[in-house]
Structure formats: structure tokens, C-alpha cells
Amino acid sequence: MNIRQLIEKNRSIRKFDESYTITQEQLTGFIDLARISASAANRQPLKYILVTTPDDREKLYPCLSWAGYLTTWEGPDKGQRPTAYIVVLGDKEISDKFGIDPGIASQSIMLGVTEAGLGGCMLASVKREKLRADFAIPDQYEILLVIALGKPVEKVVLETIKENDVKYWRDAEAVHHVPKRTIDEIILRR
Amino acid sequence: MNIRQLIEKNRSIRKFDESYTITQEQLTGFIDLARISASAANRQPLKYILVTTPDDREKLYPCLSWAGYLTTWEGPDKGQRPTAYIVVLGDKEISDKFGIDPGIASQSIMLGVTEAGLGGCMLASVKREKLRADFAIPDQYEILLVIALGKPVEKVVLETIKENDVKYWRDAEAVHHVPKRTIDEIILRR
């Protein structure tokens, strides 16, 4: 798979086969991709917590918000929930700002995840105070985002945007459609 | 090349073969990788300006700061400068915050660049007011970063961090060494 194919395949996935286990070795490998990615001034302030046990997953799930545009869908049902989470933290003892590091790291992780036949979703809409309390995350760490992971059981397709409407939608077959702006809209000057 | 090999190869490059031309088609292809990457709430607020002509490159170069830890090196000499730049902007008419979108997009671009045998450096240390004035960038757009691109003519290697010192260095053969934290340092809990 070349990088174009991999990025095309790397869609935000929100329904998973909950019977599928992601191993610690896999998760460590994904984070190692973030570890060797670029970091502003090479400070490397990002730290990670892996959440994999059924108890911890059940504790983390209510800290997340899913798919804001699907107003009648509150998130994956039991049986279709993520089987692992990576909580991405910023270590404030290393840096007071994290810039574009979290996006770089998360994209590296997601491309590793996708290449492994898995999928996931970067969730920045997180109940941070609850997550911090429930997982006893020290104040030293800023909670940046949560990456939800699992074996995908949904189909996601790209669409060309119409009338500037960025809202994704699900069709009658539960296929998830994501409208993207055109290349000519996003390149202002050549 | 699998994703691990590609990310390993994707080092921040700061010296280029200035006789090598990157085509508009290549640049468009790199930005198309960002276009189809994830975006918070699928808002897709990022816009791009390509800087490719010799005149524009000469105008943009003084807006950048290079390799803060190499205090005796002010940036690439003429003949080794980038042959293209991508200015990454946030469209404030679409969103008032850009979150992790710039990092996701920039990493997608850089992986496409690397796969094509090219290299580059994400530069967030930018003289924004000068850049805005010199390139007549409207206030509607926040200047997020500049990606400098070209054909690499330097060697960059990863090192294991020692004594918590994140500063990269160049050796007598001008090889650029980048110390990275260990996986056990960055995964707080499994």
C-alpha cells in the first residue's frame, strides 16, 4: 500500500468488532511511530496512557462524545465499542505548549493502525475533568485527545462537498459518507 | 516501504539540492493527501499557498528561523535552500480554532513528500507579520506554519536520548543527529 492508498483507507471509524483484541505489542508499535515523528524543537512533550482492560474501557467510554453531526446516534452500542484507547497527554514539565505535535503524532499512530487492518477515531471532544479524575491523571499532564481503536465494522466513503455542507451522514445501509472540500478550494494560490 | 520505514525515513531536512525542481503536480498531490485526512468535526478549515518561483522563494526565506539548537548555523546557504514552500493557513471564516488539524495535515504532506524521494521541514517559527505583509495574506487567514521542501542533501539519524537532552547536533561529517526519548519514557501506563 502506498501512502495515498493508506491515507485513503484511514477513515475515522466509530463501530468496531468488540470481540477483537488489540495486543499490547501492537499498541506499543503504534506509539513508537509517534515517538520517531517530528516534534517542535525536538522537545517530545507527548506522553501516552493505554486503556485496554474491559473495566477501564467501560470507565473511559462515558468520557467521550461521538459524531456530533449524527444527532440521533449517541455512539457505538455495546458489542461495537473500541477495544483499546490511547490517551494522548502533554507533559507541562517539558513544554507549556504543544503546537502541532499532537496532530503529527496522532496521524502517525492512525496510519500504523490502518496498515495493521485496524481503525479508529481521534476524539478531541472529551470530558477532561471526569477523565482526569477517573484515571487519576496528575495535573502535570494536559489531556490533549483520546484515540479510540478497534477492528472496523463500518464502511466510510469520501464524497465531494456540496453547497459548502461539511456534515457527514449515514445512509440507509449505514454507510458513513464524508464530504471533502475540493483541491481547488483549499489551494488559494499556486 | 511500509509505514514504519516511511516514518523513519521522514526526517526534518534543512539542506537541499537547489537545482532540483518540484513540480506543481507533485505539490498538488501532497496537499491532496492533507485534503483527505481527518479534520475535527470535518470542518476542513485549512488552506494552502504554494511558493515555488525563485523570486517568491527569496522573499519567503527571510521569514523563517532554522534549527534553533544549531546556534552557529543560520540556515541553508544559497544553493542548498528549499525549492518549494507550502504555507499552511487556518481560515477563520470556517473555524476560530484549528486544534490538531495542522499537525495531521502536515504529517500527511510530509509522508507523501518522503515517499516521493523528497524531504522537508515543518517550520512553526515564522515571522508572521512579515510573511503576511510580503505575500498579502488577508487577515481572514491565520498563518499556522510553513513547510519547506526540496531534494535532501543531508543525512539525519536518530539517537537514543541521554541525560534528558533533546538538543540535536551535527557531527564533523555534517551528519545531523536527533535524540529521541525511549518508548518506556513516553508510555506512562499500560
Image (cartoon, coloured by chain):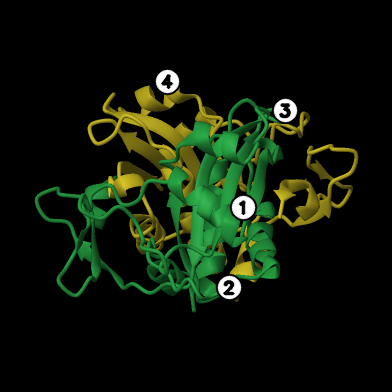
Chain colours: A yellow, B green
Q: In the image, what residue occupies the spot 42% across and 27% down?
A: A131
Q: Which kind of residue does numbered mark 1 sit on?
A: Phe
Specify the subunit that label 4 lies on. A
**SS class of the residue under badge 4?**
helix
**SS class of the residue under badge 1?**
loop
Residue identifier under label 2: B21
Q: Are marks 4 and 3 on the same chain?
A: no
From the viewer's side, name the closer residue of A68 and A80.
A68
Specify the subunit that label 3 lies on. B
Residue identifier under label 1: A16
Q: In the image, what residue occupies the spot 46% across and 71% down?
A: B6
Instruction: Specify which label sits upstream in the sequence, 1 or 4.
Output: 1
Q: Are marks 1 and 4 on the same chain?
A: yes
Question: Is residue A184 depicted above or below B142 in this figure?
Answer: below
Asked whether the viewer can see residue A139, the reply is yes
From the viewer's side, name the closer residue of A162 and A58.
A162
Asked whether the viewer can see residue A19, the reply is no
Q: CA distance from mark 2 to mark 1?
A: 45 Å
| Residue depth check, mark 2 versus mark 1: number of the one nearer the observer | 2
From the viewer's side, name the closer residue of B84 and B29.
B84
| Residue depth check, mark 1 versus mark 4: number of the one nearer the observer | 4
| Residue depth check, mark 4 versus mark 3: number of the one nearer the observer | 3
Q: Which kind of residue does numbered mark 3 sit on?
A: Glu
Residue A64 position within the rendered picture, expressed as x and y whole percent measured from the top left: 55, 32
Horizontal arrangement in the rendering, residue A125 relative to residue B4 (left or right): right
Q: Which kind of residue does numbered mark 4 sit on?
A: Glu
Residue identifier under label 3: B93
